[in-house]
Image (cartoon, grey):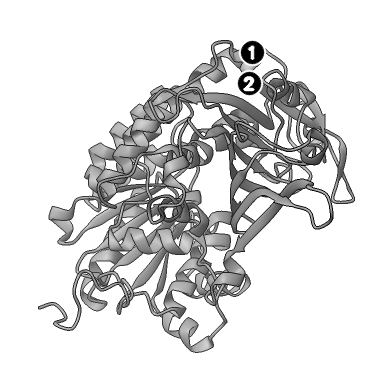
Amino acid sequence: MGNPLRTAQDRRLPRIPEPCALVIFGVTGDLSRKKLIPAVYDLANRGLLPPGFVVVGFARADWGDGSFESLAYAAAKKGARTPWRDDVWQRLSERFHFIPGSFDDDDAFDKLAETLDELKERNGIAGNAAFYFSIPPAAFPLVLNQLNRTGMADPSKTGGWRRVVVEKPFGHDFQSAVQLNELVDDVFIPEDVFRIDHYLGKETVQNIMALRFANSLFEPVWNSKYVDSVQITMAEDVGIGTRAAFYDASGAARDVLQNHLLQLLAMIAMEEPTSFDPQEVRAEKLKVLKAISLPADISSGSVRGQYLPGWVAGERAVGYLEEPNIPATSTTETYAAVRLGIQNRRWAGVPFYVRVGKRMPRRVTEIAILFKRAPHLPFDPADVEMLGHNQLVVRVQPDEGVVLKFGSKVPGTSMEVRDIAMDFQYGEAFTESSPEAYERLVLDVLIGDRTLFPDAAEIEQSWRVIDPLEAAWANTKPEPYRAGEWGPRAADEMLAREGRTWRRA
């Protein structure tokens, strides 16, 4: 019987999952230690995990439960967003289990199945389990086949729901994405597959829908009649770190443009859904992805670059070819910029400039809507020299918020007009700090809410955008730019040919 004091419409009480297990494959890796384990602690600290909730770690390390608990303790304490409370950790750590083994080890997976069966009775999780793939994409088929062999992916055999969480990159091109989708959907029910894009878990990204659809202020001008162009920027001040093998095989477009930035574009450009039902939201995003058009001449409508040695934040930075384990002849791009269009009535003729780069001057992700200039300015030309386009900028990270830029008279005796900014920041407007993206997404997986998770059709359609770019870029060399610069000069020239400039992020 449900709680008679609570209705489905009551949003004041928190959403708490049913008793369940979270199985993390690759639990000793960077993603698990830096994001997943701290997210689990923060959820527990906020009282959002159910009684009997258990974490089962699976990795190659030959550890026991105690050693795993020590690793998890260090990871949680270092990465926790909420205040540390020993009593919360004590209760949580008592429900940690570790299974050592490799992904081709049948005995280890048999042991995992036995452990989940035991926890079903001991912790009252009723057979509910989510499997998180914090592992390299090449290992996905091995683990999926093991889950299929043991029956752990079959709800009819386990007596509860079974879900799988798959990290990006989901394939490396359209064909591989289709094959991987078929494999995952063959082992799990399609509704139980959660393809995670952590950008969609960020509060500022979710606020795009609130900004557009909860206000009458913006939607009337959210179209080609008033919008001159849209710029989506993801700049990182870091290099490739320890990801040399993966990054050199993928590059900036496959690593970020295919997933994060095309998802941001879809949310900015989508039509209003009939409701926030997951299927309705994904249907509107898919329409945008299908309507994307590439430049008629990809060579002039896109730029790929690779960073040279330089200076970032006052520190010397090596070039990409000097990074550890990068071949001296590598032509992998660390910067990509492309002019996209959207072929529908709302956005016809509006260019969407999308760029991503490493070793940029600073870390920033933002979406800038640049509006058309007023059709007539009854001012002396000298008085409006400092007046630019009206802009609405959604800052995704690190200074989460929204900036509105518009013209205002400068105090004085003359009618001088220049740009000023109204700045909304999450950290100042709300007393509660924003949850980490993984915090929200892990909770959504356990609850079964797929709103923020792209489906197979979105993933495949995104690759249909990227594959022609990769084909056109094959056998070409990336444009050089120095570490600490905003990308190659060719990227500035691409916009200059159309009378525009990149926004200073």
Residue 396 placement (x, y as % from top left): 58, 52
Residue drawn at (83%, 36%), measured in percent from left and top? 382
**Which image quarter holds the N terminus?**
bottom left
Q: Single out the residue that lies furthest toward the bottom.
A: 87
Q: Nearer the viewer, residue 50 or 221?
A: 221
What's the residue at 35%, 34% (across, down)? 286
Above or below, 465 against 29 in this view is above
Quadrant for residue 304, please give it.
Answer: top right
Task: Choose between 214 and 45: the one closer to the eye.
Answer: 214
Kind of residue at disc 1? Ser
Q: Residue at x 50, y 33 (%)?
A: 258
User: What amino acid type should be assigned to the residue bearing mark 2?
Assistant: Ser
Tags 2 and 1 touching, CB below 8 Å? yes
Whether residue 482 is visible: yes
Q: Secondary structure at mark 2?
A: strand
> How many numbered markers are drawn?
2
Q: Which mark is residue 242?
A: none
Quadrant including the C terminus: top right
**Helix, strand or loop under label 1:** helix
Q: Residue furthest left?
A: 1
User: Which mark, by number, is residue 299?
Assistant: 1
The residue at which mark 2 appears reads as 302
Looking at the picture, does residue 505 appear above or below residue 423?
above
Q: CA distance from mark 2 to mark 1?
A: 6 Å
